[in-house]
Image (cartoon, rainbow, N blue to C red):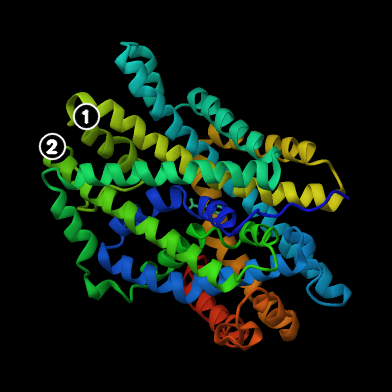
Amino acid sequence: MAARGEFSSRLGFLMAAAGSAVGLGNIWGFPTQTAENGGAAFVIVYLALAFLLAYPALMAELTIGRAKRANVVDALGHISEGKVAHYIGASVGLAGVLTASLILSFYAILAGWMMSHMVEPITTMVGATDASSWLLSQGPFRDTLFTILFSVLTMLIIVGGVREGIEKWSTRLMPSLLTILIALILYVLLQPGAVEGLQLYLVPDFSRITDPDLLMNAMGQAFFSLSLGVGTMLIYGSYVSEQENLPRLGASLTLIDTGIAFTAGLLILPAMFVAQHYGTPIYNDAGELAAGPGLIFSVLPSVFDSMGGIGPIVAIAFFLLMTIAALTSSISMLEVPVSFVSEHFGVPRKIATFVAGFIILSFSIVIVFNFEAMFGFVADLATVYFEPLIGLAFCVFAGWLWSRNEAMKALASGHPDGEGAWFVKVWPYYVKFVCPTLIIAMLYPTIMGLF
Ligand code: PHE
């Protein structure tokens, strides 16, 4: 068997893992959820959950991955002795592979929308008005074309493997993403109306903090944003060297991810109020703030339009930012099925990539042609239910089924204080009791609401 891939350095891992974590979830999902859930109250709950729940759950995936050095199915299948544990582990792993694939199938469509909006300012500048209106209106042919383009880009990167594909491209793309984001924020904050958006974003309405919907949304958002509950972080963990201090890498990753989500809020919420200043309605009839596609595809473009000559350039920059963010995430989703198929069945990586990639792409196209019936359903199924449930299963495996000695040894490897570090001592109990309790408590109202 060919040697397994490994990230070349700490920075290589951080770029790749941050590339995975920072995606449409941060730049679109987080600000939208914040706008829908009463502004700053949501931000506070989100930050608390990210560090108190998502970070330790992330450590479960990274630690299992690094210790078992395998794809999610084989890693979970070998967590403890015995046939029953083996089958349960492998089944949870397969559920992860399925969920990663489902997420990629709808994510590629969204990313395709970003690409078509990125091209549109160009057709408008050259006066191709028909092409422009085609690029701006959602329809099965436009969506199929751009979904195919985006999916093929994802496959071409993943074919390259860990260093030449994932690490190389994440390291190239992440700094450009940050540069574009900061430039856009500086511009928007100087526009009229921006301060009102900042207020909504930063001054909390504490009465909403205990709202069960807000809690559930914040947890779902935190899991999605850190790419948890699908095996992405497990497989990235399996490419980290034994010499690295894993709790510290995980903490840096959580900080980067929440930091960028928070920063994206500094762009999107003020931009909404700038748009309002220029005459675009940002509240619907029910008095709620615009969210969802309307926010990205009509509110923000109206800000770009108000900018005069540089508007089209800023629009291209913004949609390029979204496309890059989506691409470094989509590669990490595709890595889950690809690593499983290539390692488990011994299939060459190239074949595994194109087989998995095209099966998922075909499913995306089925969604495109049945958009109303399928899109929301697939997205909710994968992110609201499967991700937290599988995330719960990872915590249960790490806390209950894995021998504590082995888990501590795996976590401590590369830590300067070894098994004496307080985090290494506390974490096994934390994932065993605290994480599952929190996840169940928050999922309970949603699951009960189904009946
Ligand atoms: N974290 C990514 C985002 O915020 C989405 C993602 C989910 C990536 C699951 C990989 C796995 O957009």
Callout 1–callout 2 Cβ contact below 8 Å: yes
404 or 397, nearer to the observer:
404
Residue 131 in percent (x, y) is at 39, 15
285 or 78, nearer to the observer:
78
Amino acid type, residue under disc 1 in the picture: Asp
Distance from Cα at disc 1 to Cα at disc 2: 10 Å
In the rendering, which numbered label is found on residue 278? 2
Relative to 308, does residue 419 appear above or below in the rendering? below
Instruction: Tell me: is circle 1 under 8 Å from ligand 1.
Output: no
Residue 115 visible here: yes
Quadrant location of residue 190? top left
16 or 346, nearer to the observer:
16
Q: Residue at x 24, y 28 (%)?
A: 311
Amino acid type, residue under disc 2 in the picture: Tyr
In the rendering, which numbered label is found on residue 62? none
Provide the residue designation for mark 1. Answer: 305
Secondary element type, mark 1 = helix
Residue 303 in percent (x, y) is at 21, 36
